[in-house]
Amino acid sequence: MAQLIVRNLEEDVKARLQQQASRHGQSMEEEVRNILRDAVRTEERASAPLGTRVRDRFARIGLDEEIPELRGHKARRVVFRR
């Protein structure tokens, strides 16, 4: 396992991390590990094509159809009416 040292962290950020960790019932170190894991996962998901990200987002509610990518198609303006 790697170690990471964060220097010059503002005191209020440290205090908020401690409070958040306490709310989640874990150590501040574990809280920071989870934040870093989530940040990397979010970046990985953001690099996927939009259709894939939409399908993945709604997979838990039963969406299992392929969503076609719209590469090469001209964008159309949407008009919302009241």
Image (tube, rainbow, N blue to C red):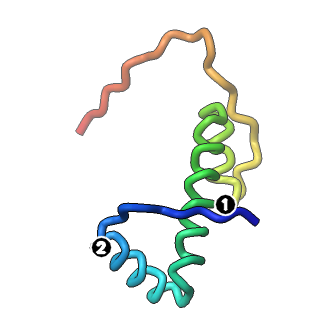
Q: Along the horizontal axis of the image, is 60 left or right of 16?
A: right
Amino acid bearing label 2? Glu
Above or below for 52 versus 57: above
Disc with the residue nearer the chain's start (1 vs 2): 2
Q: Quadrant of the C terminus?
A: top left
Q: Nearer the viewer, residue 59 or 25?
A: 25
Q: Quadrant of residue 2?
A: bottom right
Relative image position of residue 3 (x, y in whole percent): 65, 65
Disc 1 secondary structure class: helix
The residue carrying mark 2 is 11
Q: Nearer the viewer, residue 46 or 5?
A: 5
Tell me what residue is drawn at x 48 percent, y 62 percent: 6
Residue 10, numbered label: none
Q: Nearer the viewer, residue 3 or 77?
A: 3
Above or below for 57 versus 44: below
Residue 54 visible, this orientation:
no
Q: Along the horizontal axis of the image, is 61 left or right of 32?
A: right
Q: Quadrant of residue 69?
A: top right
Task: Say few, some or many: other residues with alpha carbon within 10 Å of mark 1 (under 14 / 14 to 19 / 20 or more).
Answer: few
Q: Quadrant of the N terminus?
A: bottom right
Tell me what residue is drawn at x 56 percent, y 86 percent: 26
Total numbered circles:
2
Q: Along the horizontal axis of the image, is 80 left or right of 43?
A: left
Task: Say few, some or many: other residues with alpha carbon within 10 Å of mark 2 (under 14 / 14 to 19 / 20 or more).
Answer: few
Tell me what residue is drawn at x 69 percent, y 34 percent: 67
Residue 35 visible, this orientation:
yes
Disc 2 secondary structure class: helix
Evaluate if marks 1 and 2 touch, with contact meaning CB atoms under 8 Å apart: no
Relative image position of residue 57 (x, y in whole percent): 62, 51
The residue carrying mark 1 is 61
Amino acid bearing label 1? Ile
